[in-house]
Every structure is written in C-alpha cells, then in structure tokens.
Amino acid sequence: MHKMVFILFAVGLVLLLHPKINTPSISSTQITPLFSKPVFTLENIDGIEQVFQAVSVLKISETEDSGSIHGAIIPHHTLIGQEIGSFWEILASQEEPSVIVLVGPAHQNQGRALVQTTKGSWPSPFGTVTTQDLLVEKLIQSGVASEEPNSFENEHSIGVQIPYIAKLFPETKIIPIIAQSPASHAEAEKLVETLTSLLPEKALLVSSIDFSHDLTLSESQEKDQQTLSLIKTRSYEKMNALDSRFLDSPFALSTFLLWTDQQQEMETLIWHEHSGSLEKQPSLPGTSYLVFFSSPKKEFVTLTAVGDIMLSRTVATWLSQTTVEQAFSQTREILGKNDIVFGNLESVLSTSLVEIEKLIRFKADPKRVDVLHTLGITHVSVSNNHVNDYGEAAWNESNNHLIAAGIEPIGGYRNDGQPVITQVGKETIVFLAFETWNHSLDSSQVIKQIKDAASQGTFVVVSFHWGIEYDHIQNASQIILAHDAIDAGADLILGHHPHVLQGIETYKEGLILYSLGNFIFDQFGEDENETVVARFSIGKNTRSLELIPMRIEKGFPRTATEKETQTTLQRMASWSSLELSDNLLDGLITW
C-alpha cells in the first residue's frame, strides 16, 4: 500500500513538473521522453503551405525505373516546393530505399553538440514520417551524433522534406541529422564511416542544402562556380571555409560527397537555378539551388553530338513566337538520357554593343542559354569563325553565361583553350576544340595539346571548325589534320563549319565525322536543313555510333520521316569511306 502511494505521488510530481504531458499542443513540438517519442509539427515552418500544395499533386510512380540513386542534394527553400517535388518523384521512381538519411544544417546553430539526431515522428497531411529508432540509437551510441530532440523543432532543413517522404515513401523510416555551422569535414568523415557500417543495403542519403544566399543572379553564379570547382576537386578544407554566401551547410555537402565516394559512385548535377531567375527578377538578392544525384558508375558512356547551333538572327525571332519546350519537343526526346551532349555554338551570348568589322555576325540574348539547358546540352565548342564577332570581352561574357548554366565551353579565343575533362562512370572524357579561320593553326601545337590530353583521360574528343562551306566532300587539309590528331591520341573527331553534312571515316583506332552540318539554324535549302544526331557509346569494350537523321524546319530540328532517314543515310554513305558504306545504310557503326 505504501509503495502504491509512493508511486502515485512520484507520477503526480512528474506531471506537475512536466505540464506539456498534460497539455499536448499541435502547434509546437511535443517532447515526452518518459512516455513516448517526440512529435514534431510542421505548421510553424515559414512557407510550408506552398510545400503542402506542391506535394498534393505529386503522383506515386506505378513503375519502377531500373536505375538506382543512393544519394542526393535537394534544396529546402519553400519557394520552390514544386521543383523539390519533381526531384523527389525521380527518387521515388527508383528502387525503394530501406531507410532515408536526411542531413541538413542547424540553421540557428541550436543544440549542444556539433552533430545532432533524434528519435520522433512528423505528422503531415500526407501521413506521418517516423524515425528508424534502432539505427538512430546505434548512431547515438557510436558518439558521432548527440540526441537532441529540441533542436529539431521547426528546423526546416528536415521539416520541408517530410511531406514529400510521407507522400512518396509512406513505409520508409528516416534518420534525421543536423549540424551546427562549425561542423567540418572531420565530423562528416566520422559520420559517413559510421553510417557505412550501420546502414542496410539500398539506403538513401539526402543532404538538404540551399546554396548561395542573399545574392543577385550574377553574384550567385560567381559563387556557385567556385563551389562547383571545389566539389569537382574534392577540396574539403576549402569547403569548410565557405559561408552563407556559398551555401548553408559545408558539413552536409561534405557528407554527400564522402557518401558518394564511399559507395564508389559518382554525382551528377541535374539542376542549377536561382530564385531571381525563376521569379524573373535577377537583380534582386535571392537563393541558388544545386541538385545532385549520385548513382553507380556506368560501364559505358553515352555521348551525343550535334552540329552548328545559332541562336540569333531569325532563330531568335522564331523563338520569341513559341516556347522552348514546344520548339524542341521532338529533339528533347532524342537528346534526353545522355551522359554528355555536345554541339558547336555559333553565336556568342552577350549584351555587348561592340561590333567587329565583319560581313556576318552572330550575337544572341544571354537568356537563350535556356535552349541549351532545355536540350540537355552539356558541352559546346566556342572555338569557331564567330568567336570574335563582338570582341574578346563578349566571348568571355558568353562563356561565363554558359558556365553559370552548367555548360562546359570548350576551346580558346586564339586556339589556346585548356582541355575540358569530364568524368562519367569509369571513363574520363577529355575535350579539345580548334578553329582554322580566325587564327592560324599551328599543327605542332595541336598535336602537343592532344598528346597531353591523351595522358589525362581514357577517351579524347577533338572538335575542328574547318572545311569549305556547303561542300559535302572533305578536303585534303581536313583529312591530314584529322589523321594527325588521331596519331597524336585523339579517339573521336567532330567537325563543323560547312553547314552541310560530310562523310565519316575510320582511321586506325579513331573515328572522324568531318561535318555534322547545322542543328539549330535559319538557313534555306534542303542540304542546309538536313542533319543528324550522332550518339556514341563509349566503354572499355564498347565503341559504337548510332546516326539519327533529322530535318530542320523554321530553325528547329525535328525527327526525320522514314524516307528522309534513308535518303540521309544513303547520302552520307556516298560521302564516306567505302568500308563504312553498308553499316552507314543501317545508321550503325562500331570501330
């Protein structure tokens, strides 16, 4: 009897000292460690209604993609709730993860420890997301993260992601992790090492990160390029020093990269935007977004190449009369799902008013980089006879616009460009570009650059702007230069400038496409509007080419009819080396 009275007294004392147990509220976090896990509500997160609205229209994929994404960087800015949802939809189309690890910043540097976690649940209009308590407890016991539930109250780096998980992954539990800003690469390394030993197969790690803060579009682009460079080189010490002008959590970024490398995978940048650009107010301070996915390294690379791209003159007028999506609806399907898409950019993207004395000059609105972005173009040659149409300053400006859009410019203003190295899966692709019109081409220097490039990668692509306009037959100087390039170590030669298609040749271990013709252009004539998309598969035991004939109508490429396809392949076969003729009629070449 005395024991029962004592127990009741003790319980009453606890209830008196912990009034939240008696008065639960749906407007704040309920932390009741004596009786249940904490419950974290989302209603007080600024902008969460935009997220709820975006999540309400998401659809659960009924078919599972064969791909496998094991890591991601996704923003948590509620302004882009719809875009965030599109990235979670992609993740939901992959194999279902065994657990989702969410890593983000502790925005107010709340809590005691540098790295913190919690057990608990997050109710939402789409279901409740709960923690994987056994794994959270093991993480706490390892000492790499402290259990601090109070720190997760209204922490939007975690909270914003919850509704997407509730809707698209209703059965999947999470491990939430946040870190104060002093947390560094060293803490991230310990965390990833521990996660690697604790997590089951098919775990998904998502770092919740917003990048440059309170900067205009142009200021943000500069900072983002510095961040991207550090990501590429894995310069963790320099990442640690980045402040909010660059991103809100160097720790979460390091964790994602270390996780990717630990899984022997590779990260791919799939989206790069700025709030000012999305709201059409680029001069206003805003936030930038970089979205990455990491997945297993591929056994082979798909590299797709197209011809001359000109975005000014009548093409600009035609673009103003439609949307980019409508103009290139058929082209996007063909260029989609390639690792690398390469083209020759004939028009500088510049606002310069300087004009060089030339008969024909091409200059496009810098905003027309959206065409390249929509088509998935990743690399462009900027070494051609139009590089100097508006002077070197305009050419540099154009390259900066490309870089800001995540597109690699290849080539130098004076044929002095550095090689562009791109790692895809197990292949290291090295690009070089040269032109034979504005500046003399020193063949000995070209050969030296190609030899140097060959020592840096597994596959070397060289673009030449050469040949005679409107001539389908490659001339002797093209042939000599192409052979010299392959002798020096080039694997693939891509030619531009004639504005019409030319032949294809195999030479030793290399392949030469002497001219890919036009791709986006406003010229008239059947030959000038006949083009192909060249899709290459490149791997240790794979080197193949698929030709996809197309036609240009009012400046924009479209798929060719069956008759047009056969006509183009027959014509290309007639201009090509004899041993390729039969294969060219099928549109397939291996070399």
Image (cartoon, grey):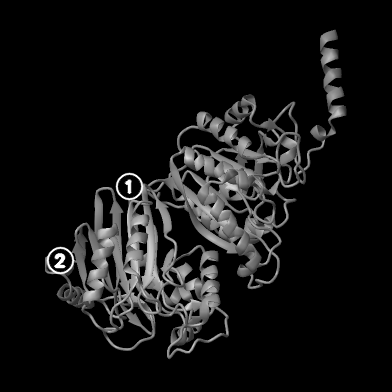
Q: How many marks?
A: 2
Q: Residue at x 26, y 67 (%)?
A: 482
Label 1 residue SS: loop
Q: Position of residue 172 (x, y in %)?
A: 53, 40
> In the shown orientation, is residue 156 left or right of residue 585?
right
Q: Position of residue 331 (x, y in %)?
A: 37, 71
* Near-viewer residue (181 or 40): 181
Q: Position of residue 4 (x, y in %)?
A: 82, 12
Indicate the quadrant where residue 114 lies: top right
Q: Residue at x 32, y 55 (%)?
A: 459
Q: Residue at x 51, y 82 (%)?
A: 390
Q: Which residue is tagged 2?
A: 580
Which quarter shows the N terminus? Answer: top right
Label 2 residue SS: helix
Residue type marked 1: Glu
Task: Assess disc 2: are there few (<14), some (14-19) or many (≥20) residues with their C-alpha within 10 Å of its C-alpha.
Answer: many
Report if the CB atoms under discs 1 and 2 are less than 8 Å apart.
no
Which quarter shows the C terminus? Answer: bottom left
> In the shown orientation, is residue 115 left or right of residue 344?
right
Q: Position of residue 149 (x, y in %)?
A: 72, 35
Can see residue 268? yes
Query: Measured along the vertical axis of the image, is residue 70 above or below residue 52?
Result: above
Q: Which residue is tagged 1?
A: 299
Q: What label does residue 184 carry, if any?
A: none
Query: Measured along the vertical axis of the image, is residue 253 above or below residue 406?
Result: above
* Near-viewer residue (298 or 415): 415
Of pointers 1 and 2, the one earlier in the residue sequence? 1
Q: CA distance from mark 1 to mark 2?
A: 26 Å
Indicate the quadrant where residue 572 lies: bottom left
